Amino acid sequence: MGEASNAFAGRTRIAANDGTIPAPHIYTALAVDGSPRYGHLVVTNAEEARAAVLLARANGYAFIKVYNTLSADAFAALTAAGREFVIPLVGHTVTAMGGLDRQLAAGQLLVAHAEEFIYSHFFAPDFDSGQSVPPTAPSLARSRW
């Protein structure tokens, strides 16, 4: 679970995972981004990336969930710290990485949503197909849910 509250991650997850309450096993992810826009933990450099991974580890998070506006340097530092402390990266397309293929090659374990492949593969930042996403596509997609 990405974006789980601290109370959920710190109490409910523990109670579920140790059998105190009947529930499935819960895995949580600490959400990180390069901008405070969506309320995630902001990581802008290698020092903050390492601190985020240590914070996740200390609080029982199973993963780091990356979001779109991380810098390539912050992503690389999260990957390195994640390897060191065995906290894998999962998440979204990081625009600065130039595509999911690069993120997966760098060590991201999982892609959060199938549409991320559309954003980064079919309309990759460095690929000019002569086509663009229709301006109404995001609102059309949202209306279907």
Image (cartoon, rainbow, N blue to C red):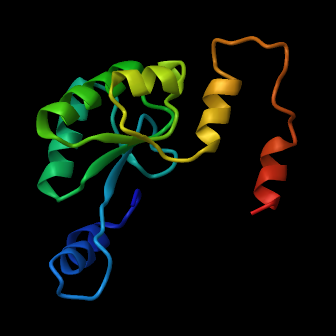
Of 32 and 93, the residue lying toward us: 93
Relative to 127, 51 lies left or right: left
Of 36 and 111, the residue lying toward us: 111
Of 131 and 110, the residue lying toward us: 110
**Residue 23 in the image, given as x and y percentages of width and height:** 31, 82
**Total number of numbered labels?**
0
59 versus 139 height, above or below = below
Specify the quadrant that holds the N terminus. bottom left
Relative to 102, 139 lies left or right: right
Q: Is residue 71 visible in the rendered structure shown here?
A: no
Quadrant in the picture for residue 99: top right
Specify the quadrant that holds the C terminus. bottom right
**Residue 16 in the image, given as x and y percentages of width and height:** 24, 79
**Residue 121 in the image, given as x and y percentages of width and height:** 63, 25
Q: Is residue 132 visible in the rendered structure shown here?
A: yes
Relative to 1, 9 lies left or right: left
Residue at 35% over, 67% down? 5
Residue at 27% over, 41% down? 88
Residue at 21% over, 50% down? 56
Residue at 41% over, 49% down? 40
**Residue 86 in the image, given as x and y percentages of width and height:** 16, 40
Relative to 84, 130 lies left or right: right
